[in-house]
Image (tube, rainbow, N blue to C red):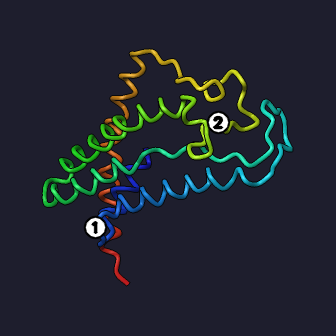
Amino acid sequence: MAIPFVLVGIGEASHQSWASTKIAAMYMLFCMAAIWILPLFPAEPKLGPVYHKVTHFIPAPFPLLLIVPAILLDLLRKKMAGKDAWLQAAVAGSAFLGSLLAVEWPFASFLLSPGARNWFFGSHYVDYVTRPTSPIATFHFLDMDRGDFWTNLALAWFFAILITRLGMAWGGSLRRVQR
């Protein structure tokens, strides 16, 4: 829920064009570098329980594909300038959630496939406390009731709009700060 707040807030506060896209790209590059670099260093668990043998540092999972929603947010900021703030938030929040779902859902399916279990995507790294029967270790989506899915999607849409509006207000207040 915090992602639209940060991307929109920094985009509003910055005087640079494509600020949200630049922040998303930096986040993704940092996380990807961790996936590529951390496994090069030896490590072993010092606490239990140990469900998986670990011989090196385990990085965080592959980052969310925030670059697509960030590009849309930057494009919409230019097109919606001067419009009502809540209308901007509704359009930007909806675009953020819709574009994130459109790119992340198929990409998440790919990350669960054998094709992503390599050094570049790093989906084969499982930490030592993850149970062998967990969806992470077995490379499966969580089973979810369809009613829960639609309820959660409606909540995500509501919060995407609300958090986007709060990010706009935060970014506007940062823009007014002077040295």
* Marks 1, 2: nearer the viewer: 2
Give the alpha-carbon distance from disc 1 to disc 2, as whole Å. 37 Å
Q: Position of residue 130 (x, y in %)?
A: 71, 31
Amino acid beneath label 2: His
Number of numbered markers: 2
Neighbour class for label 2 at 10 Å: few (<14), some, many (≥20)? some
Quarter of the figure with the C terminus: bottom left
Q: What's the mark number on residue 172?
A: none
**Residue at the (29%, 51%) spot, across then down:** 165
Residue nearest the observer in this picture, 170 or 79: 79
| Disc 1, SS | loop
Residue nearest the observer in this picture, 107 or 2: 107
Q: Position of residue 33 (x, y in %)?
A: 58, 56
Tell whether 111 sits left or right of 174: right
First along the sequence among labels 1 and 2: 1
Neighbour class for label 1 at 10 Å: few (<14), some, many (≥20)? few
Vertical relation: 37 (above or below) 131 = below
Q: What's the mark number on residue 17?
A: 1
Quarter of the figure with the N terminus: top left
**Residue at the (36%, 22%) spot, across then down:** 150
Tell whether 148 sits left or right of 11: right
User: Which residue is under mark 2?
Assistant: 124
